[in-house]
């Protein structure tokens, strides 16, 4: 799980850089060097730079969010949770892309500790701020299955597949069919797959 978090994080860093020019994100030396170190996979160096950044600029919410991922990667979940929560206090509302990622990160931490209701709330915020991210929907669907909210889970899986017909939802769909309260739910799952298969063939 720590490796997965780190891969997702580095992917976000690369993709997010495209949109950063449209926002007033930090440009201090320690912050930029910390981000660069993360892109290179050097978490120890990134930690030192970001630690120095936060000592100088404790209101840098972006640095707090990055530190949350580093702490989680290092196994300090409590500190990761504190850091990502602080980041949400500080990252501007206008930066919906980054706020969505912060909510997603905290949702993942909560999900891993089976805090289902709290995780659902964070994934819902992640979707609200960035409705085009497939991972937000699949993660919330996983939580909804744990809460036995099958209709809502299917809606999220359907939304994920509409965004990306190759989204990795097969295991969750199988779980949904196994736990489905009635035959009509199973029929809806099959119908969803058939609909999307036809769309993919048409494209």
Image (cartoon, rainbow, N blue to C red):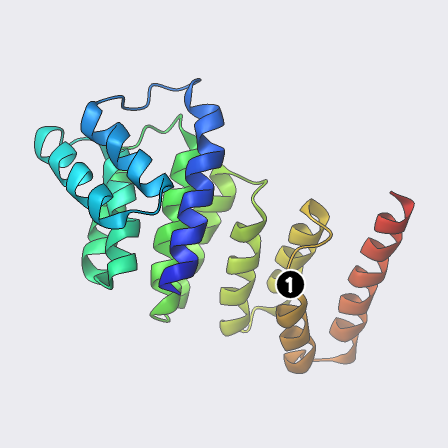
Q: Looking at the picture, tell me which residue is in the foreground, 55 or 7.
A: 7
Residue pointed to by mark 1: 169
Query: Along the line of sight, which residue is nearer the eye, 50 or 179?
Result: 50
At label 1, counting other C-alpha atoms closer than 10 Å, the crowd grade (few under 14, some 14-19, many 20 or more) is some
Locate residue 112 relative to residue 155 in the image: left or right: left
Is any part of residue 75 visible from this angle?
A: yes
Label tally: 1
Vertical comparison of 198 with 1: above or below: above
Identify the residue at image location x=62%, y=69%: 172
Q: Is residue 58 above or below residue 73?
A: above
Return the x and y of residue 32 as percentages of the image width and height. Answer: 27, 28
Direction left: furthest residue: 55
Q: Quadrant of the C terminus?
A: top right
Which secondary structure, mark 1? loop
What residue do we see at 12% from left, 35% from top? Answer: 52
Quarter-of-image position of residue 89? top left
Q: Residue at x 21, y 61 (%)?
A: 76
Q: Position of residue 165 (x, y in %)?
A: 73, 52
Specify whether residue 115 is in view.
no
Q: Nearer the viewer, residue 89 or 199?
A: 199
Q: Residue at x 33, y 70 (%)?
A: 113
**Above or below for 176 versus 36:** below
The vertical placement of 84 against 145, above or below, is: above
| Residue sitting nearer the eye, 42 or 115 | 42
Q: Position of residue 22 (x, y in %)?
A: 44, 17
Q: Is residue 62 left or right of residue 127?
A: left
**Which quadrant is home to the N terminus?**
bottom left
Which of the 4 image quarters holds residue 187?
Answer: bottom right
């Amino acid at each position: 799980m720590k490796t997965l978090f780190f891969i997702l994080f580095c992917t976000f860093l690369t993709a997010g850089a495209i949109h950063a020019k449209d926002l007033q994100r930090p440009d201090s030396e320690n912050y930029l060097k910390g981000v660069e170190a993360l892109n290179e996979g050097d978490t120890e160096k990134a930690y030192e730079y970001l630690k120095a950044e936060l000592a100088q600029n404790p209101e840098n919410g972006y640095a707090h969010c990055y530190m949350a991922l580093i702490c989680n990667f290092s196994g300090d979940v409590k500190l990761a949770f504190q850091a990502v929560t602080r980041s949400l206090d500080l990252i501007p509302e206008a930066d919906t892309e980054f706020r969505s990622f912060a909510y997603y990160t905290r949702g993942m931490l909560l999900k891993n500790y089976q805090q289902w209701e709290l995780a659902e709330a964070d994934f819902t915020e992640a979707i609200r701020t960035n409705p085009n991210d497939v991972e937000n929907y699949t993660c919330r669907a996983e939580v909804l299955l744990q809460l036995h909210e099958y209709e809502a889970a299917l809606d999220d899986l359907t939304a994920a597949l509409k965004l990306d017909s190759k989204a990795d939802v097969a295991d969750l769909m199988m779980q949904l069919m196994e736990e489905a309260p009635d035959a009509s739910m199973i029929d809806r799952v099959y119908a969803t797959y058939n609909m999307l298969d036809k769309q993919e063939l048409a494209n």
